[in-house]
Amino acid sequence: MQHEKIIILDFGSQYTQLIARRVRELNIYSEIHPYNKIPEIDGSWKAVILSGSPHSVREEKAPI
């Protein structure tokens, strides 16, 4: 039996770990990766969660 898998890309959010825990409480496998170190995403991943940061997307130093 193959489990559902979700990848969480961390853009500096303070809630990334909480999101991952809630996803895992739903019996869904999840991995957290920094936004600038994205692993190869193949067909086994069912979803991607983008966990934002407190920076405005309009700020000059906001992560891209």
Image (tube, rainbow, N blue to C red):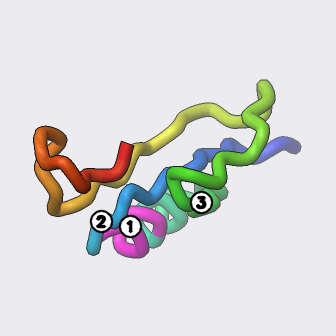
Q: Secondary structure at mark 2?
A: loop
Q: Per the image, is 17 magenta? A: yes
Please identify the residue farthest to the top as the structure is shown.
43
Q: Nearer the viewer, mark 1 or mark 2?
A: 2
Numbered label attached to residue 16: 1
Q: Which residue is mark 3?
A: 33
Q: Residue shown at 18%/41% (left/top)?
A: 57
Single out the mark in the foreground, 1 or 3. 3
Q: Name the quadrant containing residue 44.
A: top right
- Mark 1 → mark 3, Cα distance in angstroms: 10 Å
Query: What secondary structure is marked by label 3?
Result: strand
Name the spot of residue 25 as percent of width and height, x first: 48, 67
Left or right of 30 in this view: 13: left
| Badge 3 density bin: few <14, some 14–19, many ≥20, Cα 10 Å | some
Could you tell me which residue is drawn at 38 percent across and 42 percent down?
64
Front-lying residue, 63 or 50: 63
Which residue position holds label 2? Answer: 13
Answer with mark 1 or mark 3, whichever residue precedes in sequence.
1
The relative height of residue 22 versus residue 28 in the rendered view (above or below) is below
